Image: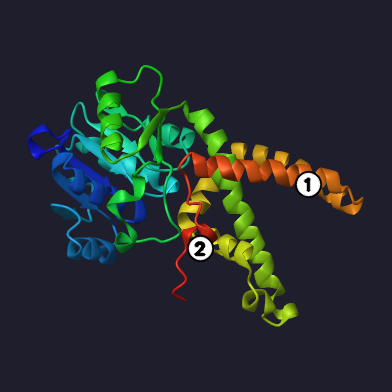
Amino acid sequence: MTVTDSIFNRITIVGAGLIGSSVARAVRKYEVCETLALVDANETIISEARDLELADEYYTDVEKSVDNSDLIMLAVPVGAMTSVGAAIAGNLKAGAIISDVGSVKESVFKALDPLLPEGVHLIPGHPVAGTEQSGPSAGFATLFDDRWCIITPPEGADEDALEKLSALWKAFGSRVEIMTPGHHDLVLAITSHVPHLIAYNIVGTASDLEEVTRSEVIKYSAGGFRDFTRIAASDPTMWRDVFLNNKDAVLEMLGRFSEDLTALQRAIRWGDGDALFDLFTRTRGIRRRIIDAGQDDAAADFGRTHED
């Protein structure tokens, strides 16, 4: 694709963290717009983004950044959606598309929809991709390659706007799925949110045990615990907002998890080896299906290098 047949004339990305900076890099790499604006209220972050040459224009004032933009991509914590939406509402042109990259969708729609003027198309989205790193330097253009991007248009969404947004993510190499916001939030609660919550809890418990075990928890960390610490290193602000804004789905999935954990405790207590073996066999099969679907690497130790 060349600039002459780009999808958008002007794109504004609000937020220059891992996902925002990766979107910016992908926009430049695949030439999906003529002008790219990047905004972040943190002057240090936007200065770093400028040094990395991530965009054509840079702003710390979100109101000015969206002037004449065809697509505004909100890459900010879910809890900031209302304040950002209120700030940009008066500067949006008719026909502009507002989307986002957050992992909660119903609360995003509820926060933004009442604020936006008529003629502006709100179509939330969620690229299911990321790392535990954060900041402009952590992003990379291929982050979304062969990953799912879930788009959650409201009922009666403008078809042309939906097609353009889908085309953008497909240009980045993503596989696009259309889903209702509520279904998205339930699915992500079990595939992403609860696993993160478990990781935060396990690492927190290990931290509490450090004094008792004389640092042996850290010293003798095995692969499983290392993987939990990787997940638990994710951005605290983003994940605080995820849990507060998807609490119903997360609590529902936690209830299911607690019931299954009780059954597992019972199997261990009563020496039910068959039940344990059946569970472990079933979960091993799920891991193989994830690899077969291209959503992870089958290399030893999850494809890590061993330079350290």
The residues bearing labels 1 and 2 have C-alpha atoms spaced at a distance of 31 Å
Callout 1 touching callout 2 (CB < 8 Å): no
Crowding around mark 1 (Cα neighbors within 10 Å: few <14, some 14 to 19, many 20+) is: few
Residue at screen point 30% across, 30% down: 166
Residue 214 in the figure: left or right of residue 199: right
Mark 2 — residue? 233
Residue at screen point 20% across, 48% down: 29
Q: Can you see residue 223?
A: yes
Residue 116 in the figure: left or right of residue 221: left
Mark 1 — residue? 277
Crowding around mark 2 (Cα neighbors within 10 Å: few <14, some 14 to 19, many 20+) is: some
Direction top: furthest residue: 156
Q: Based on the displayed image, in which of its 4 quarters is residue 246 positioned? A: top right
Direction left: furthest residue: 4
Q: Name above or below for residue 196 compared with residue 251.
A: below
Quarter that holds the N terminus: top left
Q: Residue 205: x, y in percent? A: 69, 65
Q: Secondary structure at mark 1?
A: helix
Q: Residue 307: x, y in percent? A: 44, 74
Q: Amino acid at mark 2?
A: Ala
Q: Residue 91: x, y in percent? A: 20, 38
Q: Based on the displayed image, in which of its 4 quarters is residue 120 positioned? A: top left
Direction right: furthest residue: 270
Residue at screen point 30% across, 63% down: 137
Q: Name above or below for residue 261 compared with residue 118.
A: below
Residue at screen point 20% across, 56% down: 54
Q: How is the image coloured?
A: rainbow
Q: Amino acid at mark 1?
A: Phe
Front disc: 1 or 2: 1
